[in-house]
Amino acid sequence: MSAHADVRHAPGPVGGAFFTPGVKIVAVVAGIGALAIVYRLAFGLGAATNLNDGYPWGLWIAFDVVTGTALACGGYAMALLVYILNKGQYHPLVRPALLTSAFGYTIAGVSVVLDVGRYWLLWKVPLYFWHWNLNSVLLEVALCIMAYTMVLWIELSPAFFERGVTAETPWIRRVSERGLPFMKKALVWVIALGLLLPTMHQSSLGSLLLLAGPRLHELWNTPLLPLLFLVSCVGMGYAAVVMEGALASSVLKRRPEREMLAGLGQAILPVLGLYLVLRLGDLVWRGQLGALFAFDLYSVLSLIEIGLFIAAPLMLATERQRADMGNLFRAAMVLVLGGALYRFDVYLVAFNPGAHWSYFPSVGETLVTAGLVSLEVLGYVMIVKYFPILTGRAPEARAPILART
Amino acid sequence: MGISRRSALKAMASVTATSAVSAISARPAAAAEAPADAVGMLYDTTLCIGCKACVVACADANDRERDTAWSEGKWQAPVDLNQHTRNIIKLYVDGPTRSFVKQQCMHCIDPACVNACMLGSLQKREFGIVTYEASLCTGCRYCQMACPYNIPKFEWTKAFNPKISKCELCNHRLAEGKEPACCEVCPREAVIYGTRADLLAEAHRRLEAHPDRYVPKVYGEFDAGGTQVLYLSHVPFEQIGLPDIGPRSVPETQRSLQHGIYQWFAAPVALYGVLAAVMLRHRAKQGNETAGNADGGQP
């Protein structure tokens, strides 16, 4: 039970130069994205996007917000595992997961600001409580996501304080010295909020489309939408942590937390089992098996999507498969693709406003999304280099192999 | 035995599961009643000659720019409802069967757009008219996702201050004691204005008087929970763009689910308590086992 007190797993700044060649390339993509954002703000949604009156929601909602926050459920999924299921040995993965989650949600927030037509009025949504329409699922999603983004940064704040206590500026030191013990006391209440809010809004991201019921294809139109979104986001959260752990260790030249990542591979299994029972059970119960095997566009996309959700657990079935880092990474990617496709299917494919409407993301929309993702990568690299987030030290500084505790 | 992690997970699952079940097994919701003062319009495909006077009158009355895109700037010829066009006449052709059809907001009794709107920018106000107030609108366009009739339109071409545009039954004209512009200008009385009750009675009178002429149904009497704009047609309604939604109002499924989950906000508060309790328990246990462990569970 003392695994997380183990020196091998204590988080520390990665250090090293920030502007590596890889970071420079990512920075260029972020810069191009910034230009696309300026274009959208200057010329409006009609000029910058392919959105239209038939498809008022496109890439920014389906990817940046709905898929992006599901991928940013790593913090949520890890907190469930560590704090509720009490698997303390996974503690070292919590901070990096929280960091990607915090960036994922922040980026989603930026996307919403760009996507709504009247962004300068967004401040009214949390503040004009006497105008709140309590029937609006979108209101709940908006308030929850705003609150959760703040909660994520607060959950991360000990990492900043830990660095801050060694700062030279006196006031930073003072704030950090007071912040650390305060956070230690408050953390249970903050983490509980960090578990409650995603449970609410990730399920509600599914409920949102129930309102489009008459125009939603039967393969996806079910009152179970919220539950399917909630269960799949937990699976995607673990998958994102696995991918991030593997990528960070290979790019930043750190020793990967092999055993922990393999353990996550196992944690994914019951989640995916539940998802598949719900997804397939729902189709059987609503008598949609015929539609599932009609082999039209909708059927093929559902089959691919369900196939990905079946392939992932098959790739993770045995301990040996999970111990193979390459295979683990690929399985996580399959699951992420499945979850992303499910969300794209619900938001863009199942939603059918009529034959004469069509939508495919514009160059501008794609550049903005690519730019925001790049910004997220830049922020991540910068923070792990200067703040204690990642564990697993660099190979050359490797400690002697200790007996497993 | 206090609260276990199992009970926490159970609580989390039940938050969505129980309400999902309650929504599925929900009794068919009592049909929403039209407001007592509900007004509306009755459109009759057998009377409309497709002159489009109503399209022009609507743009005039609502101060809309002329949509001349299709005619390359020569005359007003919208091809669909859009940011300039709140009312349109379309022609349905299938072999020898032809029908004009008028499209505008249906002013649903239980509107999906109103249900969707975060701050109540879209609201059902006096006479049951679905109105729009831009000062509370963030331009999120959830109303567009929600409306089963594809009615609310967004001013895509405006970079600054784009608004939602939709028929508000000329409520500014009603306040002056006038009719909606489209009804006033119609030379054939193909579209008429009145209270919903009167219009329903008139529609049924026509159906009884000329059963050979019409599909035997008043569209909007019960469809989607009832609408305040009613239709009579000589061709099947689905073919002129009026979908068969059934009598259940569009927001009903989502609303019963959502209210099932969030009734009194009790479930979230309870879940929060359970989650915190589980963690405090773990922490207390851990404290006993490894007293003095520096890493007391911070992330």
Image (cartoon, coloured by chain):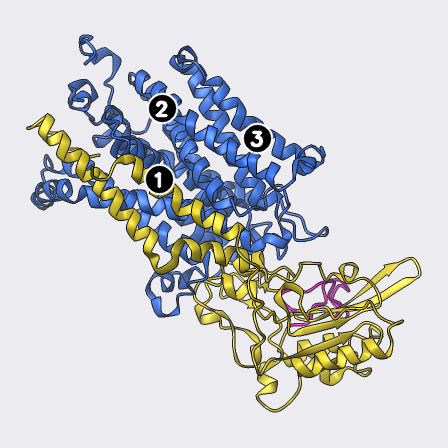
Chain colours: A blue, B yellow
For marks 3 and 1, give the one nearer the viewer.
1
Work out whether disc 2 and disc 1 sit on a shared chain.
no
Q: Which amino acid type is shown beneath numbered disc 1?
A: Lys
Instruction: Choose the circle earlier in sequence order: 2 or 3.
Output: 2
Residue A397 in the image: x percent, y percent?
20, 13
Identify which residue is drawn at 46% across, 32% down: A274
Residue A177 in the image: x percent, y percent?
8, 41
Residue range highlighted in magenta: B65-84
* Residue lying furthest right: B96
10 Å crowding of disc 2: few (<14), some (14-19), many (20+): many
Residue placed under numbered mark 2 in the picture: A264
Q: Which amino acid type is shown beneath numbered disc 2?
A: Leu
Residue A278 seen in the figure: yes
- In screen coordinates, is B247 left or right of B290? right
The picture quadrant where one finds residue A296 is top right
Residue placed under numbered mark 3 in the picture: A306
Residue A86 in the image: x percent, y percent?
25, 30
10 Å crowding of disc 3: few (<14), some (14-19), many (20+): some
Chain hosting mark 1 = B
For marks 2 and 1, give the one nearer the viewer.
1
The picture quadrant where one finds residue A345 is top right
Residue placed under numbered mark 1 in the picture: B10
